[in-house]
Image: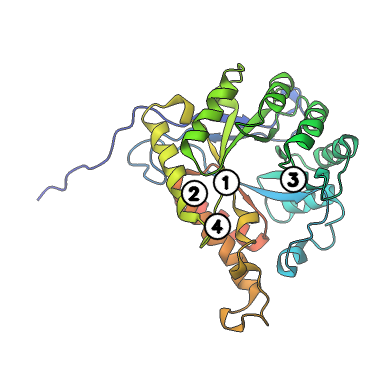
Amino acid sequence: MEIPNVADKWSSGVNEITLGATKDKGGTRTKTITIGGSKCVPFMDFEGNPGHKPIIAMDVCDVPPEDWPETLSKPFADVLNDPAQWAKKCVEQYGADMICLKLDGIHPDKGNKSAEQAVKTVKSVLAAVGVPLIIWGCEQDEKDNEVMPKVSQAAKGENCLMGIVSQNSYKTLTATCLADGHSLITMAPVDINIGKQINILVSEMDFPLNRIVMFQSTGALGYGLEYTYSIQERERLAALTGDKMMAMPVICDVGREAWRAKEAKSGDSEVPQWGSREERGPMWETITAVSLLQSGVDIIRMQHPKAVAAVKKCIDRLY
């Protein structure tokens, strides 16, 4: 009996976005990265062009993270006080495709660093590595609206990915990124309707749709993974069926969320029956990342080098 062809045919696809700018484009990056472009459900390339491979952005913080367990901080122990060297280690030693510079230190409760200090950090990281840069604010609207425009201006010409904007606070950073030539991350709290609405609001300010990356608040394994997966899957299906306001590539914050789980961060003496945290923690991050890849993800923010290596190997095998 002949096996029927059950492949779906899709009418549209995910936007392509190129991040970073080399010297000939007015920047200083040694390479650019293009994401998106998928015209099929993830890993079902018999239905269409799978687009560009998902890429991994390793997190670098502007201040030493106080909530990281020793297992996570140990690989970076020699560079935690130097974001530039931290970024360099992520790229040269651990193979990061991009760096996500998290400006936690500007938060009023985490140091309240000034815009000038943030600019200095951004410039040092740009000088240390040649890969494209994600610059992520502290997620406190008032402080981000004060600092991020100056950071954007300092990185003008580099075509960074800047974020985040939400439906309650989007005008300042959108206007700044539009003026300085950066791409933009739009955020929604695991809600597809709000995700679409913020894209509409940003586009109404004449921000190009092909410079937007969507972010739904990420849930880790055991802590809302299925909700994030479901929303991102629906976003991908909407993109494939022609919804222009859902056709943006997607970024996930896997590292931070995975290491907040007690199963990842609890010490060996607390739960000896769970096995070594040295293996358990990176495994929790890896499983979260690989699971969300199947929902349709283009950039994965990650932290532990072991998890990064495992997920990169998985991506290479599947693509």
Residue 33 percent across, percent down from the top left: 62, 36
Query: Mark 1 or mark 2, which has the lower sequence index?
Result: 1
Question: Decide: marks 1, 4 in contact (CB < 8 A)?
Answer: no
Rounded to the nearest whole Å, what is the CA distance between mark 3 and mark 2? 22 Å
Location of residue 11 with respect to 288 vertically, above or below: above
Rounded to the nearest whole Å, what is the CA distance between mark 1 and mark 2? 7 Å
Q: Residues within 10 Å of mark 3 (few under 14, many from 20)?
A: many
Question: 93 or 154: nearer the eye?
Answer: 154
Q: Residues within 10 Å of mark 1 (few under 14, many from 20)?
A: some
Query: Mark 2 or mark 4, which has the lower sequence index?
Result: 4
- Which quadrant holds residue 250? top right
Query: Mark 3 or mark 2, which has the lower sequence index?
Result: 3
What residue did someone put label 3 on?
102
What residue did someone put label 1 on?
217
Location of residue 56 with respect to 185 vertically, above or below: below
Residue type at numbered disc 3: Lys
Q: Mark number for residue 220?
A: 4
194 relative to 9 in the view: left or right: right
Query: Mark 3 or mark 4, which has the lower sequence index?
Result: 3
Query: Mark 1 or mark 3, which has the lower sequence index?
Result: 3
Q: Mark number for residue 281?
A: none
* Residue farthest toward the left in the current orientation of the protein: 1
Question: 123 or 131: nearer the eye?
Answer: 123
Q: Nearer the viewer, mark 3 or mark 2?
A: 2
Residue type at numbered disc 1: Ser
Q: Residues within 10 Å of mark 4 (few under 14, many from 20)?
A: many
Rounded to the nearest whole Å, what is the CA distance between mark 1 and mark 4? 10 Å
Question: Decide: marks 1, 2 in contact (CB < 8 A)?
Answer: yes
Q: Secondary structure at mark 4?
A: loop
Location of residue 42 with respect to 226 vertically, above or below: above
